[in-house]
Image (cartoon, rainbow, N blue to C red):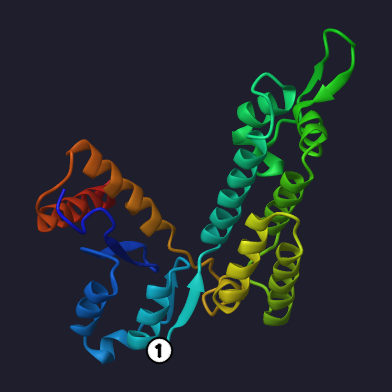
């Protein structure tokens, strides 16, 4: 695999959704060279700059797209919480004997721990030993509360998912501040670090919730999906020596998909 191909930068248009280009690397030097070759008049037409929580993108936005509104996609905030949850789960699991029920619960329910609560099964079952009627969701939460740090982190992430987008500025900023405080006061170091990230990127995260002129949910989901596709292409081809060939392959796949 050629150096720098593993983490290319995918540029997409939002309205309509389409891939504009693929840049060899997300490094500052590569991005500066690429965007520096685009006329300022063209760059100034960009209204929204959507990215993840990467300091390089913040610098690129300030240098080349100063008139645009920077948005951190909500997906990346949820991913931040999800990664923290998983780290807490693994850390706690190491404290227990591998034959204990606590270890078994944390080991086998990792998908449920990372899942939204509204997706947990509410189907009723009957315990064959006690005759008790229960749902998976009820038992899951009863067991989850055995681990206060994990339960606290789970509820912060889950509550965040219920906030509606396209809201007014004051309401959104109040919501962001609530989650910054909850994370900052959390009992786990992992969630406190989430609070630091929320505080650092609060304005950009808020921009993803604030009602915009198009009344749309502005996201870079297509770019994230293409990142996964690029990963699949690289694995299936056992790497590419030529970035230009990879770029053409990605653009070809996208063009063929748009025809269907």
Left/right of residue 190 with respect to residue 5 in the rendered view: right
Q: Nearer the viewer, residue 184 or 59?
A: 184
Quadrant position of residue 201: bottom right
**Label 1 CA crowd tier, 10 Å (few <14, some 14–19, many 20+):** some
- Look at the picture and state if 130 lies above or below 4: above
- What's the residue at 22%, 72% (across, down)? 30
Quadrant position of residue 80: bottom right
- What's the residue at 73%, 22% (across, down)? 101
- Residue 211 at least partly seen: no
Q: Secondary structure at mark 1?
A: loop
- Look at the picture and state if 251 lies above or below 124: below
Where is residue 65 drawn, in percent x and y?
Answer: 37, 85
- What's the residue at 50%, 73% (across, down)? 71
- Residue 172 at least partly seen: yes
Where is residue 107 drawn, in percent x and y?
Answer: 62, 29
Where is residue 240 drawn, in percent x and y?
Answer: 14, 47
Where is residue 167 drawn, in percent x and y?
Answer: 67, 73
- Look at the picture and state if 146 lies above or below 209: above
- What's the residue at 21%, 76% (across, down)? 34
Quadrant position of residue 182: bottom right
Could you tell me how many numbered marks the image carries?
1
- Look at the picture and state if 183 lies above or below 125: below
Left/right of residue 59 with respect to residue 252 in the rendered view: right
Left/right of residue 44 with respect to residue 166 in the rendered view: left
Q: Nearer the viewer, residue 74 or 166?
A: 74
Residue under pointer 1: 66
**Which residue is at the far top?**
129
């Amino acid at each position: 695999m050629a150096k720098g191909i593993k983490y290319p930068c995918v540029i997409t248009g939002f309205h309509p959704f389409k891939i504009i280009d693929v840049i060899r690397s997300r490094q500052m030097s590569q991005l500066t060279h690429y965007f520096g070759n685009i006329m300022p008049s063209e760059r100034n037409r960009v209204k929204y700059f959507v990215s993840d929580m990467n300091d390089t993108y913040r610098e690129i936005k300030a240098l080349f797209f100063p008139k645009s509104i920077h948005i951190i996609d909500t997906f990346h905030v949820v991913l931040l919480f999800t990664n923290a949850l998983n780290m807490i789960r693994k850390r706690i699991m190491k404290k227990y004997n591998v034959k204990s029920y606590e270890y078994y619960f944390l080991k086998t329910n990792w998908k449920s721990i990372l899942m939204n609560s509204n997706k947990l099964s509410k189907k009723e079952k009957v315990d064959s030993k006690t005759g008790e009627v229960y749902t998976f969701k009820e038992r899951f939460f009863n067991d989850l509360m055995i681990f206060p740090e994990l339960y606290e982190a789970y509820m912060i992430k889950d509550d965040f998912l219920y906030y509606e987008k396209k809201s007014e500025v004051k309401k959104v900023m109040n919501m962001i501040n609530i989650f910054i405080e909850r994370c900052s006061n959390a009992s786990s170091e992992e969630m406190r670090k989430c609070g630091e990230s929320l505080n650092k990127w609060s304005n950009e995260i808020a921009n993803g919730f604030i009602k915009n002129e198009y009344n749309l949910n502005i996201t870079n989901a297509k770019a994230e999906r293409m990142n996964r596709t690029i990963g699949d292409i690289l694995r299936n081809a056992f790497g590419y020596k030529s970035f230009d060939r990879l770029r053409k392959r990605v653009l070809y796949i996208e063009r063929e998909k748009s025809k269907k």
